[in-house]
Image (cartoon, coloured by chain):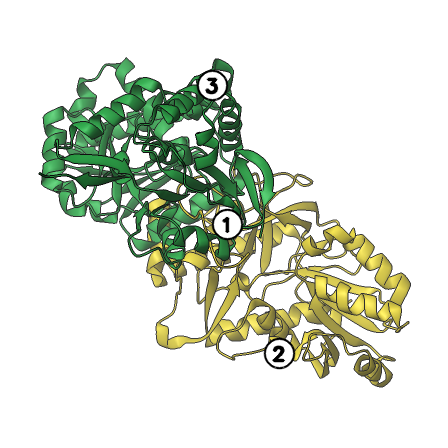
Amino acid sequence: MLTDVFTRPQPDKEKQLRDELNALVSHHRQSCPPYARIMDALGVRGEAATVAELPWLPVRLFKTKKLVSVPEDQVIRVLTSSGTTGEVSRIHLDRGAAATQSRMLARTLATVLGSRRLPMLVVDGRGVVGDRRSYSARGAGALGMVNFGRDHHWLLDADDRPDVEALRAFLDRHGREPFLIFGFTFMVWTYLYEVAREHGLDLSQGILVHSGGWKKLVDRAVDNAEFRRRFGADTGLTRIHNFYGMVEQIGTVFLEGPEGGSLYCPDFADVIIRDPVTWQEVPVGTPGVIEVLSTLPTSYPGHVLLTEDLGVVHGIDDGHWPGKRFSVLGRLPRAEARGCSDTYQGGTP
Amino acid sequence: MTLRMRFPVGEAVSSVADLLAPNEVEPLAVGDPRMVDFLAAVAKRLLTPALARRHPELGSLGFFLRRRELLGAVERLHSTLGPDTLVFPRGRVFHVPPANVDTIFVYSWALSALAGNTNVVRVSPRSAAAADAVLEVLNASLAEADPVVARTQLMVTYGHDDAVTAQLSATSDLRVLWGGDRAVENLRRHPLAPAARDLTFPDRSSFAMLSVPGWAAASPQRRREAANAFANDAYWFDQAACASPRTVFLVGAAEQADEVRAEFVALLEDVVQERGWDVDAAMAVEKRVGAYGLAADGGVRRMVFHRNALATLELAEVSATPRHWLGAGTFPFVTVPDLTELVPFVRRRDQTLTHFGFDRDELTALARSLGGRGVDRIVPFGAALTFAPVWDGHDLLREFVRLVTVND
C-alpha cells in the first residue's frame, strides 16, 4: 500500500513533532491571549524537551471558551460538535488551516483509497449536511468525506430508512470495481451490514472507512474484531478501516491499518497515553487517557489536547506502518458532583 | 403517571387526587405535641451509633431534630409575636428539594411539619443512600406515632411528570423550591393558587476568609484543626453545595499572606492524604477544564495541580473571583489587605462566609457594611454545612406559619 503520511519511525517522528509543536506553542501564545494566559498560569517556560512534556489543554475547553489564534475577519469556517449536555465545541478555521486540514486528510485516506476518486456510498441521509457555515459533527464528517468520492449514493431516504432498491442499483453500476463506503460505525452496522446480509448483497469490492465508537454496539456484542469478521463472512467486505478523530483536531485521523485492530498515527500527529492519577505517560500495554498531538491546528490552539477517551498503545514501530499502534477503549464517565443545583431539569421525561 | 410512596411507604398511587388528604377532624397545630413526639422519635433513631457511623450527615440531622431543639424553635417563634397575634399552620406545603444533597429535604420538611402543615415532599429518583436511610427511619418511627402523622405527611418519588408537579403546585399554599436557578425557573412555570407563594433556594456561592494576623497568632494545633475543618466544609459535597467554600480570601499583608497560603495548602494536602480522599479521572479532567477556563478569562497568576484531589489558583485581584463551580477540590486564593475590600464584591447570590482568625467585632462590622446585600451566614470553619433554622436569610419556621391578629 503506497503511503506518504505513514512513513516515520517513532524516534525521528518525535524529534520532528517536538520541534514543530514547540513552535506552535509559541505561535498560539503570541496569537491567542486566553491560551497565553493559561500557559502563563501554568508557569510554562522555554521549550519542551520531549513531546510528552508539551503542555496540553483539556479538549472540553473548546466547549467552554472561545480559543482562536487568527483575527476574526480571517475566520472562514466555524466547526461545531455537540456534546451530550448541549455544550458545543467551536473550532475556528482560517483559509490556510482549512486548506491544510483537507489536504492532509486526503493524503491520509489516499493510503487506503488510492489517489483516484471512487464511487461512494454514504451510510447516512442527505439531510445530515445542512447549513454551510456551521456543521454538526456528523454533518462535518460526512461533508469532509464526500470530497473523496464521486457518484455519491446516500443510503438513507428522507425518512432515515435504508433504500434497498437504490442500493442494489448503486451496486449494479459500481459494485464490480473498488468503491468507497463511509459512515458512522453504529449506522454502518445497523443500516448497511444488516441490510446487505438480509438481501445477500455483494460488498467485496468496497473499502469501508468508518468512525464513531463502539459504545452503541456493546449491547449487541459487536466489537471491532466481530465487526470485521461478520462483514467479511456475510457480505465479502474485507477492506475495513476504522478511524479515530475529533472536530477539535479536524483533518487529523488515526487510521486502522489493513491488518485490522490497531490505529496508526500519521507523520504529523501522535498519541500519548497518560496515567489518570500521575498524568505521566504510561508504558506500552497500559491503558490510560488519550492525549492527541497534531501540527495541523494553526488557527486555534488545538495542537496538544487531552481527550476524555481511554486508550492503550499496543506497540511502537512493530506494525504494518511505523510509529505507535493503539486502540480506543471507551470514554471517561462524565463527572457528576453532589451539590444543591440541578435537581429538576423539568419538561422532558 | 405513578407516584412511588416513600413515606408512609406503600403501594404506588396513580393520581395526585389520591394523595391529597381530606381535612383532619383535629388538625395539627403549630408545635403540635403529636408531631414533636414523632420528630423526637426520629431523632433518637438517627442518633444510634451504627447509623451515624454509616452516614455522618444523619448525626447532624438527629441533633437538629431533638425534642429540646424543636421546642426551643417553637418557643423562639412565639417570643417574636405580640399578645394580639395568633399563629397557625400555613396549610398545604409542597417541597421540591435538591437531588444531590441527600438530607436537606428532611430539614425543611421537618420545620414545616413542626409548624403543623400538611406536607408533600418530592424525593428525587436520583436520591442517594443517606436519603434512603432517612426514609427507612421515618417509616420505622411511624409505628409509635399518632396516625395524624401518616395522614398529613407524604413523601413521594415520581419522574419528571409536569402534570403531577402542576397539580401539587395548584393545590398548595406554599411551595418550597430548592435546586438552583434553573430548577426554580422550571418549577415556576406551574402556577400557584392566587394566595399561595414560593420560598425559593436558588444558586448560591460561598467563600472562606482567613485572617493573616489571626493565623500568625494561632498555635500549630489550631492551624491543623482549621485546615481539617475547612476540608470538611469543602470536600463533603464535592465543593458543590451552596454553602461549600470555594475561593479563600486571605485578609492581611501580601507578603505574610503568601506564607500563610503555602502553610495552609500544605496542611490541606495532609488532611486530604490522611483521609484518603480522592477524585476520579473524570473529575480531575473537569477540574482542569474549570481551572484552565478561569485562567483563560484572566486574573489567575498561577495554578498548581498538587494531586487530583487538590488544585490551587492564585488570583490577582478580588474581581477575578469565580462564582461558578470549578470541580471538587479546586481552591482559588486571593489576598486583600482588609475586609472592607470584600464589600463591593459581594452580591445577592453570595450565601456563606466561613471564617478563621477574626474576632466577633470584625465579623459584625463586615455584616453591617454588607447591609444585607448578600451573604446570609458568617460561620466558623467547619460549620459551613451545618443546617440552621435560619437559612438563606429566611427564618424557616416563620415562613411556614400564618399569623392572625385579634384586636379588641
Q: Circle 2 sits on which residue?
A: A127
The picture quadrant where one finds residue A121 is bottom right
Report the residue at 54% width, 57% height from top.
Answer: A84
Query: Where is residue A207 shown, x and y percent of the image?
Result: 78, 70
Query: Where is residue A343 shown, x and y percent of the image?
Result: 44, 47
**To which chain does the residue with label 3 belong?**
B
Q: Circle 1 sits on which residue?
A: B17
Report the residue at 57% width, 41% height from top.
Answer: A281
Q: CA distance from mark 3 to mark 1?
A: 32 Å
The number of numbered badges drawn on the structure is 3
Q: Tell which of B402 and B109 is nearer to you.
A: B402
**Disc 1 marks which amino acid?**
Ala
**Disc 2 marks which amino acid?**
Gly
**To which chain does the residue with label 1 belong?**
B
Q: CA distance from mark 2 to mark 3?
A: 61 Å
The picture quadrant where one finds residue B226 is top left
Q: Are callouts 2 and 3 both on one chain?
A: no
Q: Chain A rendered in what hue?
A: yellow
Chain with green colouring: B
**Disc 3 marks which amino acid?**
Arg
Asked whether, in this view, residue A224 is left or right of residue B7, the answer is: right
Q: Are marks 3 and 1 in contact (CB under 8 Å)?
A: no
Q: Is residue A134 visible?
A: yes
Q: Relative to B143, is A113 above or below? A: below
Q: Circle 3 sits on which residue?
A: B45
Q: Tell which of B99 and A37 is nearer to you.
A: B99
Q: Helix or strand or loop: what does disc 1 sit on?
A: helix
Asked whether, in this view, residue B198 is left or right of residue A212, the answer is: left
How many residues crowd around disc 2 within 10 Å: few (fewer than 14), some, or many (20 or more)? few
